Amino acid sequence: MTFKWRGKPLFVRHRTEKEIASEQSVDLSELRDPQHDKDRVTNPIWVIVIGVCTHLGCVPIANAGDYGGYYCPCHGSHYDASGWIRKGPAPLNLEVPYYEFPDEDTVIVG
């Protein structure tokens, strides 16, 4: 799902068990901007990232690219389901805003 938050796209992704297991098993030494999955998500089922490519600010396409996460059509950056940069010119992972889950059915961003 995509929402507008502070003038930017906000991607909210419900990950499958397969995606969670895959992202949690990534070798951090393979990542350009290493961050453990548990440091990027509060609840492993949900990934919440700002939908702006860290290369030059284009909006990536969800559920696309070589890693099944996000693909930036402007210059070819590929992000996985956690928003980690995996391929292309982007220098950093997709940004994770502050958010919290006050209960099972509600998320507050910002």
Image (cartoon, helix red, strand yellow):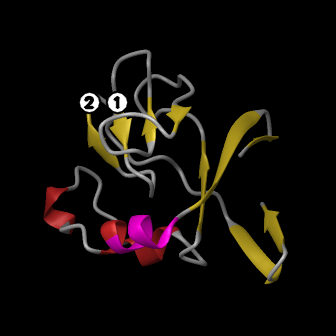
Residue at left offset 69%, top offset 44%: 10
Residue 57 is inside the magenta segment: no
Residue 100, located in which quarter of the rendered image? bottom right
Callouts 1 and 2 close, C-beta under 8 Å = yes
Where residue 7 appears, as percent x and y from the top left, is 79, 33
Residue 77: assigned label = 1
Residue at left offset 52%, top offset 25%: 57
Residue at left offset 77%, top offset 78%: 101
Task: Single out the residue that lies furthest toward the top.
Answer: 74
In depth, the one of 9 and 66 nearer the eye is 66
Disc 2 secondary structure class: loop
Q: Which residue is mark 2?
A: 88
Magenta range is 16-21
In depth, the one of 41 and 24 nearer the eye is 24
Quadrant (top left/top right/bottom left/bottom right) for the C terminus? bottom right
Where residue 96 appears, as percent x and y from the top left, is 57, 57
Above or below: residue 46 compared with residue 104: above
Q: Which amino acid type is shown beneath numbered disc 1?
A: Ser
Q: How many marks?
A: 2
Residue 20 is inside the magenta segment: yes
